[in-house]
Amino acid sequence: MDSLRELIDQDNNHNLLDLLSSLCQGSIAVDENCNILWMSNAYKELIDIAPDVDPTGCHVEQLLPTTQLPRVIKSGKPSFVDLMQIKHRWCVVTRLPIKNENQQTIGAIGFVFYDDLESLQPLFDKFARLRRKFEDEKILRPSRYALDDMLGRSQPTALLRRQALRAAQLDTTLLLLGETGTGKELLAQGIHHSSTRRSAPFVGINMGALPEALAEAELFGSAAGAYTGANSKGRVGKVQLADGGTLFLDEIAEMPLAMQAKLLRVLQEREVEALGSNRLEKVDVRIIAATAKDLRELVEKGQFREDLYYRLNVLPIKLPPLRERREDIPELSQHMLQQIQHQSQLPELSLSPAAHEWLKSYHWPGNIRELRNRIERGCVMAEGEFIEANDLGALDDLPHTTSNQPKATDLKSKRSQTEIDAIQQAIQNCNGNKTAAAKILGISRASLYLHLNKMSNK
Ligand SMILES: Nc1ncnc2c1ncn2[C@@H]1O[C@H](COP(=O)(O)OP(=O)(O)OP(=O)(O)O)[C@@H](O)[C@H]1O
Ligand SMILES: [Mg+2]
């Protein structure tokens, strides 16, 4: 037997697998690359996957971000009893590596138990007591954003989640790169809360929102009476506040050059000097920086220090824009819709099929933030039980340059101008696909062609 897949394939009637499933409340098998070979229906139910969905071939971390199976494969060692939280339920799990005749690990199987755990009750009690103790001592802080809050099942999002999980295990400086609204802050917080620093503070600072004159004291602190009119007691800088934890430097490209030199010292020497103090303090912070700009280009223009760039660029993580992970849009919009309705206690609303189509085809310059704003707007604008594409602002923000025609003044020509703009925009958003464009516009393909004919005859 060379691979676990072969063994599973040989077990035509899945007798062995059925036997495994009957022994526990969930079982799973993965190959040596941690791709799922088999998952019992009970396991699917446990993690909210429909029974007819086939997860084979998926990387196990994609579905079970906290799984330890990759570790079992890597080490080749079993883990007989462990506690794992799956969808808020504590379970006992057993994981076994499967080896071939040459003792090479060719996969692993995992079992989950959560029923009939009486014999393990003392263990649970002890665990619960320790947990309470930790919580009492505020060692476990409630996290605002965990990696679990990152929604989306597209390939790029799954890859991002895996990179984030790995980055959380390391203590290196991270550079998050991504357009506005792609989730840089959410990711930074998620990484912090999954790292060993989770019990220490996460301190964020937005360099873009900080006036240059205040930036230094805000970031590095100031000694008592450091500058006239300032708080004579001095202030603690964000770097010192983050001691032991994570310092999130958002919009790092906006950091003034003078401050960049000081930050470099924090990164190199782990030391900070408060304004006017002449005293160096040791700090232990993990730095996560984020930017939507091309730092390399800024280095070339002399607007960003090259040495700092290399210090920050240890582990760059790229967040893909929403238009490159459109498969995430239905799940994200559904989640946001539910959240907004829950918060504002609006009557139940759903997105119309045309609105769904539009959401999937729009180019999303503002990414997930824009998606949320548009869904919010849809909730306010919807007239009936459905949010239509128009309610989401599908016909707004059309580029004013799409047409060279003179400005229309009377109602009729204004209307036809709006139509022309909407049609051009829809076609552009659908990369020229007219069938999709017609769907978004809520008209038939034939009538779209009629409009286009009319437009070209004008
Ligand atoms: N994968 C995701 N799942 C759910 N919500 C997300 C996801 N990514 C981002 N969001 C939400 O989108 C919004 C924007 O995210 P965030 O503020 O982290 O983006 P950003 O990249 O820091 O944006 P900016 O550059 O504008 O500061 C937030 O409300 C965040 O909760
Ligand atoms: Mg941000």
Image: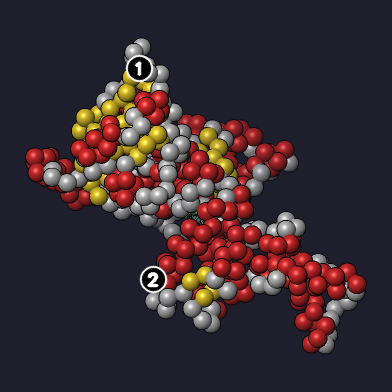
Residue at x 53%, y 34% (from the top left corner): 315
Front residue of 230 and 1: 1
Alpha carbons under labels 2 and 1: distance apart: 52 Å
Residue 50 locus on image (x, y percent) = 38, 52
Residue 383 locus on image (x, y percent) = 53, 82
Front residue of 436 and 7: 7
Front residue of 142 and 46: 46
Label 1: element kind: loop
Q: Quadrant of residue 209?
A: bottom right
How dense is the environment of label 1, judged by Cα within 10 Å: few (below 14), some, or many (20 and up)? few
Q: Quick one: which residue is furthest to the front in this view? A: 13
Residue at x 13%, y 43% (from the top left corner): 117
Instruction: State left or right for residue 369 relative to residue 406.
Output: left
Q: Quadrant of residue 452?
A: bottom right
Residue 31 locus on image (x, y percent) = 40, 28
Q: Which residue is mark 2?
A: 342
Q: Is residue 13 above or below residue 41?
A: above
How dense is the environment of label 2, judged by Cα within 10 Å: few (below 14), some, or many (20 and up)? few
- Residue 309 in view, yes or no: yes
Q: Quick one: which residue is furthest to the bottom in this view? A: 410
- Residue 206 in view, yes or no: no
Residue at x 32%, y 45% (from the top left corner): 41
Residue type at mark 2: give it.
His
Residue type at mark 1: give it.
Asn
| Dot label at residue 196 | none
